[in-house]
Amino acid sequence: MGIVRKTAKLAASAIIVTLFSIPFTVLTSDTDASSAHQKSNAETQPRRPISIGQPTFPRKCAKGRTGSFEAYVVLDFDIVEDGRVKNISVVEATEDCFIEAAIAQVSNWKFKPPLINGEPGIVFNEQQRVKYVHSGVDANNTMYSPITPGNSSLVFKSQKPPSFPEECIKGRTKSFNAYVDLVFDVTAKGKVENVQLLETDDECFVNSAITAISGWKYKESLVNGKRDISRGEKIRVKFRFPGSPEEIKILDVKTANRLQPILEKVISEDYVGALADLDKFLAEERDSLKSYDLATVLEFRGGVKMQMGDFDGAIADFEDALATSGFSDERAERLEAFILEIKAHQKELEADEDG
């Protein structure tokens, strides 16, 4: 029996689990991960799971958090002779909350049975990154994004979103975006201090942003592994006004009612049933749906197909959704970028199969 002990190198193809407004998860490739699997001998090829089950975003980890955020867990494990995963251990995690979900997910992975020098063998110390992404849109139409990487050890304890100042939309009916860039310090105990304005494109939103960020709490601040003040953290608070009621795109009540039980099937991971219901819905109502409703249903069905590993079908639905011109420019751009990510992932898989 052959044995391969791999060096601690992280796979370039990782799993990204994404929580969107519609609660489905996504498998794609992590282009930001570090160097790819390295061959420890001529017989060892880069390894990808042939089965990953259903990736699940642990909703408890997003509870009370309204800003966009990413988290990841790096796991080390062995691949035994039949391709199953054994002896999982945690190498690194940005947030402990995601560890349980990541281990449960990777425990269900199945690889092609490894051959070492032409014989069944065991691969030790395989490593993969499971990455979680939260879209970051909240009910108050605010988002957050770091301006610079900052202190990666900082973890939110509480994060109340800014209020949307009513005086900032008086007399304005068109949709618009505004931002406030802030700099602040985090004490060793995780308290935010010395919040100052860096830049804004609308002074009206400054007080709301400063008030909210001043009340944020972090678990603690670590600098070089020791509890200490973290200075100069920078963040951009984004405000979005979707427009007056006549300009806001919402689903028709009939469409929303039709989608609700399908959404419940997705939540319970009955993807086959959800897909069948969506196919039936489109077959019956496609020609009568408003462009926004049709685009939303197609995007929804594409997401379900992603869950089932049908990447080509998902891309087709996403492209059909864009062709309806039912989405706002911002939403269409996000979907276009996502399609490119899926296609890049497919190319990576094809290259691995050819190799």
Image (cartoon, rainbow, N blue to C red):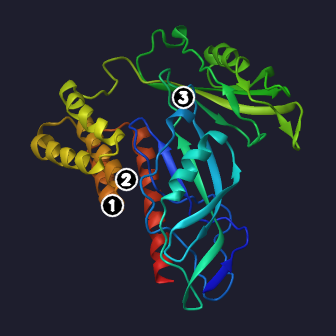
Whole-percent x, y for residue 218 in the image: 74, 28
Identify which residue, 59 or 257, lies in the foreground: 59
Whether label 1 touches label 2, CB < 8 Å: no
Q: Which residue is mark 1?
A: 310
Counting residues from the start of the chain, the first of labels 3 and 2 encountered is: 3
Q: Which mark is residue 63?
A: 3
Whole-percent x, y for residue 194 in the image: 83, 20
Whether label 3 touches label 2, CB < 8 Å: no
Q: Secondary structure at mark 2?
A: helix
Identify which residue, 36 or 347, lies in the foreground: 36
Identify which residue, 92 or 254, lies in the foreground: 92
Mark 1–mark 2 distance (CA, rounded to whole Å): 8 Å
What's under tag 2, amino acid-wise? Gln
Whole-percent x, y for residue 54 in the image: 42, 53
Mark 3–mark 1 distance (CA, rounded to whole Å): 30 Å
- Is residue 161 shown above or below 60? above
